[in-house]
Amino acid sequence: MKLFTQLALVSAIAVSGNAMAMQALDDAQLASTTGQDGITLTIKPPVKPFAALTAGAGGVIAIDHIYVHDKDGLAIADGGTGTAGAITLDGFAIAGNTPIVVKIDADGGGAAAGGAFLNVNVALPSELIIRTGVIGVADSNRSTGALSTVRGINGTSTKILDSIDVKLGGATMNIQLGNQVQAGHVNTQTMIKVSGSIANGLSISGVTLRDDTGSAPTATNLGSSGGQIKLGEIVVTDTANGAAVAAGTLTLATDIDVSSNGLVLTLGGGKNDVLLADVRLGDTTLATSSIGDVEIVGLDMIGAQIAVTGH
């Protein structure tokens, strides 16, 4: 009798499970069952001592040095020496309050859609800080000609810019490779579309351009060099036509393509307001060097293109 009871119970469970499996699904339930294939990467950078840059469950990617080598320098005819130089970034870091999420899908496309393509969607944390580190220039160990195993720089770097913090986040990049079916601003198709919005706008702080060599000022000479240009903060938001923008956002809308002209960025979105806070010239350690704040209202660069290439 006990065995019969157990068999009956198992049968009831099996029947109820099959009955649930055979129930009709409404449109919302059907939608949730589609689009489940593909690869999702969740990238959580390691926590570093300066992870306090952003609060949350994210982390920091840190790089000691980045060198961009110009292997032939500036031509003698253009006023240079033709010696290899390098742009240096010392102390580069990226910090976020949440992990970066990457979703990858392969689509057949079809003849009408332009063929198969790989779709890569990258969602950045809502709070993201890029720290450039100290930016300078140095004598490069690299040179023109065959690939060399000699790397790095000679001596120390000459500081040009103090470390800059760029605060942004909430952006989404959609990348299509193989074929491109997403519409662009100028071209009918674009490789990378950047969209989203940044709460409180794009903030860039710590901008100090240095010219620390040359003659100091005297009673009869104002000095040829030896000072700085400092911007306490640069804030870019959607235009508010002079209204308060403390709670403003910056809408991101940029298309990125690769052409024979190099990497081409096409700017979209709308007009922007730019605030340059605490602009200082000269000895920027003195409060008297401040000329105040500068506002640019209604900056219209919609449709502008920027090409980055080598020469």
Image: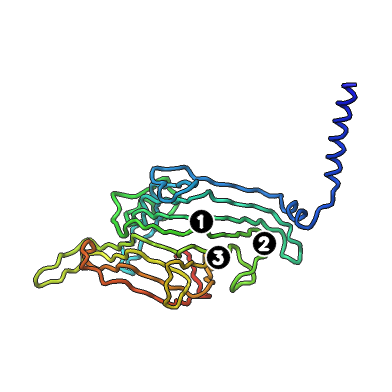
**148 left or right, relative to 121:** left
The answer to which of marks 1 and 2 sits earlier in the sequence is 1
**Residue type of the residue flagged with mark 3:** Ile
Tag 3 secondary structure: strand
Q: How many marks?
A: 3
**99 left or right, relative to 242:** right
Q: Given contact means CB atoms under 8 Å apart, are the residues at marks 1 and 3 in contact? A: no
The structure residue drawn at horizontal position 46% and vertical position 75%, both measured from the top left corner, is 240
Q: Position of residue 172 (x, y in %)?
A: 56, 59
Above or below, 287 against 97 in this view is below
| Residue 179: mark in rendering | 2
The answer to which of marks 2 and 3 sits earlier in the sequence is 2
According to the image, label 1 marks what residue? 126
Point out the frontmost of discs 2 and 3: 3
Tag 1 secondary structure: loop
Q: Residue furthest left?
A: 219
The answer to which of marks 1 and 3 sits earlier in the sequence is 1
Q: Position of residue 1 (x, y in %)?
A: 90, 21
Point out the frontmost of discs 1 and 2: 1
